[in-house]
Image (cartoon, grey):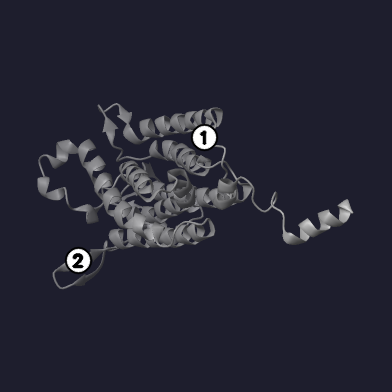
Amino acid sequence: MLGTAQPLNPVAFELGPITVAWYGLIIAFGAFLGYLLANAEGKKRGLPKDLIADLLLFAIPIAILSARLYYVIFRWDYYSQNPGQIIAIWEGGLAIHGGLIGAVVTAVIFAKKRGVSFWKIADITAPSILLGQAIGRWGNFVNQEAHGGEVSRQFLESLMIPEFIINGMYINGTYYHPTFLYESLWSLAGVALLLYLRRVNMRRGELFLTYVIWYSVGRFFIEGLRTDSLMIFDLLRTAQVISIVLVVGAVALIVYRRQTGVADKRYLDNDEASKTGSGKKTGSSPQQGKNKKKKRK
């Protein structure tokens, strides 16, 4: 019945003085599934053992810090007056774009140190990043944040979504757009697309850039529905501006890399075959050598 919906408890459990929030657990779960997916693909693509795990040891904490820093900067009017809340990440306030910046910078430095192609790592991890984002949005649901504007219960029921989501969107006497759900579903569709594109054997780097374009397009439109957007000069929604910049930048980078020839390698290319310049297709087996001799006779 209207007005009887109860919000989910954001606290998962308590261990003495330690409080564990669902927000953190959900993000950790998304990161774990993303790791499993990336690690499996890394093995297929010939990455050194444990390279993905080593990368995540640096990338995850740096991404969390940069995501929080990004959020705090654009909400400095509040945090400057409440500095004690800056570290309260369990209450929400992790900006995905900030996290991506930190993760990409970390991956570039890491790849250079390990002597591995950054673009190869980026292509392998792209579906995993999007999967983590899709799962992580459910942390916003538990915290009843990152929602859209007011809607009616009838509207939510028309979306054919589960009752518990409808109840979760009932906040302080009003129902709201489940924008967390829109973005989660958009991201899951993106994961399916990227996994399919792996089989198409795209040019190296373009799988990751497709991820950037896909997520940014969806985020641009979904952000327009939200009521808690980070703003630039109280005029522009930060996420929409960043999304436009990322789409244009990704497309320009695809064109540039193709024209300059730096994107000649493809996702499924065998590295060893590329180094020798031959591979199985051009190499000759002992039996093939014998057959050639017979033909000459």
Disc on res. 262: 1
Q: From the viewer's perspective, is residue 8 above or below residue 192?
A: below
Residue at position x 37%, y 60% in the image = 53
Q: CA distance from mark 1 to mark 2?
A: 49 Å
Question: Of the residues shown, which amino acid type is indicated by label 1?
Answer: Val
Secondary structure state at the residue bearing disc 2? strand
Secondary structure state at the residue bearing disc 1? loop
Question: Of the residues shown, which amino acid type is indicated by label 2?
Answer: Thr
For the residue carrying disc 1, how many other residues have a C-alpha within 10 Å: few (<14), some (14-19), or many (20+)?
A: few
Q: In the drawing, does residue 118 fall left or right of residue 12?
A: right
Name the residue nearer the viewer: 294 or 76: 294
Q: Position of residue 60 (x, y in %)?
A: 31, 54
Would residue 5 be seen by someone viewing this image from the given angle? no
Name the residue nearer the viewer: 48 or 100: 48
Q: Position of residue 151 (x, y in %)?
A: 40, 44
Which one is earlier in the sequence, the residue at label 1 or at label 2? 2
Q: Quadrant of residue 222?
A: top left
For the residue carrying disc 2, how many other residues have a C-alpha within 10 Å: few (<14), some (14-19), or many (20+)?
A: few
Disc on res. 49: none
Q: Which residue is mark 2?
A: 19
Name the residue nearer the viewer: 247 or 90: 247
Residue at position x 21%, y 41% in the image = 72
